Image: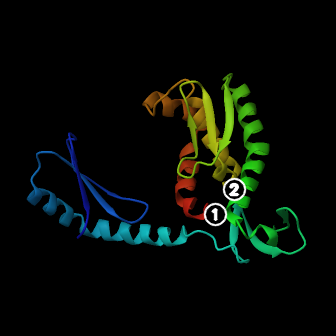
Amino acid sequence: MEYTLIRSKRKTISIVIDRNAAVVVKAPERVSLQYIESYVNSKKDWIEKNVNKMSLLAEQRQPKKYDGGEVFMVFGREYTMCISTIDVKIRIVGDTIYFPSKFLSDPKEKMVKWYISIAKKYIVPRTQEIAAQLNLSPQKIKITRADRRWGSCSSKKNINFSYKLAMAGEMAIDYVIIHELCHLNHMNHSQNFWAAVESVMPDYKKYKKYLKANEHKFVL
């Protein structure tokens, strides 16, 4: 079985299947290769199961072709794209996203800008609303082009959200907002941090799982 071995000063061996379905083994510096091989072989069934799972998700994360008929997520709902020769801007009617044919020279860039615009209109004021309820005061709230992180909070109390968050359901958006707002008081993921998140949203784990389970759908 092929895998990437990373040694460090850690105390235990762990196996991670990354988003590209590659196997990564993390092991202590002094553990023998023979022991590592034995450990990996003992987890063979688990590894194969999860490699297959991640391979499927990797296939589902393939970039859109923008040829009409593809599904895009907006605030947790699915919309089918229709290439339009008469529209001059992206718009939603019913369950359809009408995408101007004149944008096909650079379709992803046009969609990113569109998602940024709708994220600004909803996520920024929603963050301000929740922050006021929690008596918290972020310095700045921005929508960014981040692809791998839903949000971030800097030591200067600036909060950023990925444009992709506009693809998620509203309760999942609230979870990410609360998550980042709680970082204003806890710049880590300690027990106190998670306790703060739970005090605001007792069922936050449901929405954390939702984001992970649906991440493959949020691709442009």
- Say which quadrant the C terminus sits in: bottom right
Asked where in the image residue 18 lies, by quadrant, the reply is bottom left
Q: Nearer the viewer, residue 14 or 9?
A: 9
Could you classify mark 2 by the number of other residues whose Cα lies within 10 Å: few (under 14), some (14-19), or many (20 or more)? some
Residue 180 pos. (x, y %) = 59, 35
Query: Which secondary structure lies at badge 1?
Result: loop
Asked where in the image residue 184 lies, by quadrant, the reply is top right
Say which residue label 2 marks.
112
Residue 75 pos. (x, y %) = 72, 55
Q: Nearer the viewer, residue 122 or 196?
A: 122
Say which residue label 1 marks.
220
Residue 82's place in the image compared with 26, above or below, is below
47 lies left or right of 110: left
Q: Amino acid at mark 1?
A: Leu
Q: Residue at x 9, y 60 (%)?
A: 34
Q: Amino acid at mark 2?
A: Val
Q: Nearer the viewer, residue 11 or 3?
A: 3
Nearest to N terminus: mark 2 or mark 1: 2
- Say which quadrant the N terminus sits in: bottom left
Would residue 17 be visible to someone looking at this image?
yes
Mark 2–mark 1 Cα distance, whole angstroms, equals 8 Å
Which residue, as the protein is rendered here, is positioned at the far front? Answer: 105
Q: Are marks 2 and 1 in contact (CB under 8 Å)?
A: yes
